[in-house]
Amino acid sequence: MKTDCVIAGGGPAGMMMGLLLARAGVDIVVLEKHADFLRDLRGDTIHPSTLDVMHERGLLDEFLRRPHDELHEVAVRVGQEQAKIADFRHVPAHCRFLMMMPQWDFLDFLAEHARRLPNFHLVMQAEARMLISENGRITGLVARTADDDLEVRSALVVGADGRHSTIRAQAGLQPRDFGAPMDVLWLRVSRKVDDPPELFGQIDAGRMLVMIARGDYWQCALLIAKGSGEAARARGLAALRQTLLGLSPWLGDRVEELTDWDAQVKLLRVAVDRLSEWAKPGLLCIGDAAHAMSPIGGVGINLAVQDAVAAARLLAKPLRDHELDLAALQRVQQRREWPVRVVQRMQITMQNRLIAPILASDGPVRMPWFLRLVGRVALLRRIPAWFIGVGVRPEHVG
């Protein structure tokens, strides 16, 4: 195949960039290594700033007709104290709520609209495995497909293939690792109509749990100390059920739904890292391939989408005019690196000052003073809502 731009990775960054570039008249190929988007290990949050992009592209009304939940507040319980810590009803955005939708539905929606464009091509079961370079410039890639290897020649290769990016590794780009004190056990239990409606963070000595509403079940993220996944597995499902009940007693006998560790519990290894260089001639990395984020605040998806919007806006004309150079690619990093640095610095601070001490604690924990203050002062709840829902330097369609 020959195209203007080939994007490795059909996640939020890759699909959004592909759709926006195709709408701008650029010929696009997006490669997704799986046969569909239906995988549990994806975030569900769609932020007000992403919904603003959908509005600017005239897609919002149709998108909002898809099944979803709208989260207007976020609450957390620490020990025996509970507080509301974010209120999205005042964010400076078109939609003043955090949208909860399985990511595969979001990606299917983007793919559905992108496929209507004659210059957009989505190839499923195509895993990028090798870059092609000529005279010091990346000129394409080779992907493994269900049938045979596929060679794609292009003016631009975009690595949007996640924190374990093959494109990044092939290009010899090494991220700086900032470390994380936790990993995550990812699991689900059924949900009842009278369960707490908020995105409910629950914290106690040595344990932290976030429960995300997905229709008739809760997607649960149980934070554990870094590297302790195998030890948790060795303790078995009975210990895991007791941990969940200790944090959320109202789950009751629903924890008995967990009967098979291999099938129902997934270990996510948390990483926080960032490339010093996002681009080489003919190559650009965005999203997790450029900067893996901590799960704190659930803002990684938002940053990936914002990268895609900025990249599409800045690169559409150079790609159409066949005038793409390294300076154009570096402008994407110059635009997006500062927001990433700010968010990662805040996440690392939270990891070191809040999460690490709690996970290391074996005694009673108390609500930190700043969370207690936010819970008591309604006006302060707008600050974390803005940080999570809109973020630093939100991008708009050009």
Image (cartoon, rainbow, N blue to C red):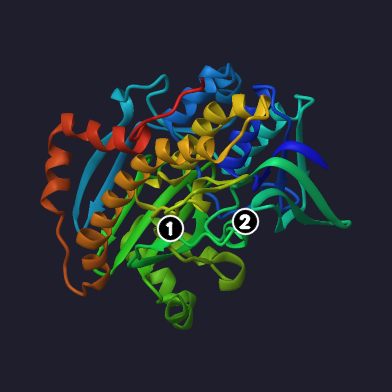
Residue under the image location 55 percent in, 41 percent down: 326
Q: Nearer the viewer, residue 45 or 189?
A: 45
Percent position of residue 93, x then y: 38, 22
Query: What is the three-letter code of the residue carrying label 2?
Result: Ile
Percent position of residue 286, x then y: 52, 45
Dot 2: within a 10 Å radius of its alpha carbon, few (fewer than 14), some, or many (20 or more) residues? many
- Residue 300 seen in the current view: yes
Q: Is residue 3 above or below residue 39?
A: above
The disc, 1 or 2, on the residue closer to the chain's N-terminal end is 2
Q: Is residue 152 above or below residue 80?
A: above
Locate residue 97: give its quadrant: top left
Locate residue 394: give its quadrant: top left
In the visual, does 48 lie left or right of 361? right
Percent position of residue 17, x then y: 59, 34
Query: What is the three-letter code of the residue carrying label 1?
Result: Ala
Q: Residue furthest front?
A: 135
Dot 1: within a 10 Å radius of its alpha carbon, few (fewer than 14), some, or many (20 or more) residues? many
Mark 1 falls on what kind of element? strand
Quote the CA–CA distance across marks 1 and 2: 29 Å
Residue under the image location 66 percent in, 24 percent down: 321
Identify the mark at residue 239; answer none if there is no mark: none
Percent position of residue 22, x then y: 68, 27
Identify the mark at residue 221; answer none if there is no mark: 1
Q: Are marks 1 and 2 in contact (CB under 8 Å)?
A: no
In the visual, does 360 lie left or right of 161? left
**Residue position for label 2:** 167
